[in-house]
Image (tube, rainbow, N blue to C red):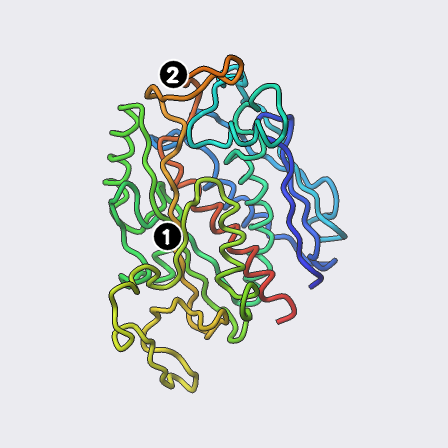
């Protein structure tokens, strides 16, 4: 495989958004069912947690694909249809959004509606790329599964609770895409929505089939590669691998993963390190969790400023927003992880 590159373009309320992908070998068959599965999970549905903005997310391969086969660099686009730019303030930035920072950075006269290129809308083309690379990884026996681990402090079953890959795959079929406690999570989100508020949560991702030796040291390590892609998903504010912050307060004797032989292969008896030693895969499942902040766009009054008058202002936001982005973001995090793993396993 040539050097992989993924580039997103467009804006939340622009005519279209898209992705350019290089490095996929000509002749590769595209798994369009896999793309559809990721886009379907990411797409807004009529649920308590989801925005009322309903985009079909029908995509088109502009170039690089003929009859489902890669012929060159890939360009895919999605048209935006259900936009309401008038819902967004022109001069009052939304707290915790990129409105003010991008207003200054880009030298704007008005705030870009819907967050522009910083919007979660940009994760739709990301899922197209992720679906392509998930298909390629599957041919190598590498599988990437992301699901909701917690919402609003309500935790579901996860890898360290003994979750199987079958349970992870099944969880992705029904909102909120959690292995367990999904109904409690949805009730908490509904309660927050009724109050005009929002909730955050955690997505867990498990990567199985990673070959021993993938990755390297310093910034070429697995953690670096995955974090680089996952932090491209808006609202992600933290990431941990294996036990992560659970290592704090533990003894090495408690959390080291002993090696042993099993069916003629070297494995570890536990997997507290999340399948990674020194930035390199040790052959065990790679496990990480990403935490997402509560959606900043809420209906409660918020303190802000008016950039046209340079005075303090109160923002009473209108528009259509997610009460909890976590279920939809799980698909985007899965896509981002697949891109990272595809880069890590090039030539392996």
Going by the image, does 13 lie left or right of 311? right
Residue marked by disc 2: 314
Residue 43 percent across, percent down from the top left: 48, 36
Q: How many marks?
A: 2
Q: Position of residue 90 (x, y in %)?
A: 53, 17
Quarter of the image with the N terminus is: bottom right
Q: Quadrant of residue 292?
A: top left
Percent across and percent down for residue 324 are: 36, 35
Point out the image quarter for the C terminus.
Answer: bottom right
- Density class for disc 2 (Cα within 10 Å; few <14, some 14-19, many ≥20) is few
- Is residue 232 toward the left or the right of residue 21 in the image? left
Q: Quadrant of residue 189?
A: top left
Along the line of sight, the residue nearer the viewer: 243 or 63: 243
Q: Secondary structure at mark 1?
A: helix
Spatial separation of the CA atoms under disc 1 and disc 2: 44 Å
* Image location of residue 73, percent across then percent down: 74, 50
Q: Quadrant of residue 83?
A: top right
User: What residue appears at the point 36 percent right and 84 percent down from the top-left corner?
Assistant: 260
Q: Which residue is mark 1?
A: 170
**Residue 244 position (above or below residue 36):** below
Q: Residue at x 64, y 30 (%)?
A: 16
Seen at 27% across and 24% down, the residue is: 194
SS for dot 2: strand
């Amino acid at each position: 495989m040539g050097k992989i590159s993924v580039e997103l373009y467009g804006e939340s309320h622009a005519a279209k958004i898209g992705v350019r992908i290089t490095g996929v070998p000509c002749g590769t068959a595209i798994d369009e069912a896999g793309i559809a599965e990721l886009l379907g999970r990411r797409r807004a549905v009529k649920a308590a947690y989801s925005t009322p903005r309903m985009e079909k997310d029908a995509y088109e391969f502009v170039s690089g694909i003929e009859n489902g086969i890669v012929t060159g660099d890939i360009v895919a686009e999605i048209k935006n249809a259900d936009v309401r730019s008038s819902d967004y303030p022109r001069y009052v930035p939304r707290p915790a959004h990129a409105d003010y920072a991008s207003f200054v950075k880009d030298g704007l006269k008005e705030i870009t509606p819907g967050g522009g290129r910083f919007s979660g809308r940009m994760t739709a083309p990301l899922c197209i790329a992720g679906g392509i690379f998930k298909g390629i990884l599957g041919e190598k026996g590498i599988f990437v599964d992301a699901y909701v681990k917690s919402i609003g402090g309500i935790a579901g079953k996860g890898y360290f609770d003994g979750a199987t890959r079958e349970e992870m795959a099944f969880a992705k079929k029904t909102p909120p895409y959690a292995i367990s406690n999904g109904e409690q999570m949805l009730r908490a989100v509904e309660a927050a929505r009724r109050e005009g508020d929002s909730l955050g949560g955690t997505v867990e991702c498990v990567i199985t089939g990673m070959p021993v030796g993938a990755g390297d040291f310093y910034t070429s390590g697995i953690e670096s590669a995955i974090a680089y892609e996952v932090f491209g998903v808006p609202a992600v504010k933290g990431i941990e691998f294996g036990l992560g912050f659970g290592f704090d307060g533990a003894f090495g004797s408690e959390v080291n993963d002993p090696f042993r032989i099993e069916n003629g292969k070297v494995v570890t008896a536990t997997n507290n390190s999340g399948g990674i030693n020194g930035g390199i895969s040790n052959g065990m499942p790679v496990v990480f969790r990403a935490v997402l902040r509560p959606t900043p766009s809420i209906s409660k009054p918020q303190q802000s400023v008016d950039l046209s008058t340079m005075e303090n202002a109160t923002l009473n936001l209108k528009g259509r927003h997610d009460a909890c982005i976590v279920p939809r973001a799980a698909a985007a995090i899965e896509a981002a992880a697949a891109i990272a793993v595809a880069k890590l396993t090039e030539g392996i």
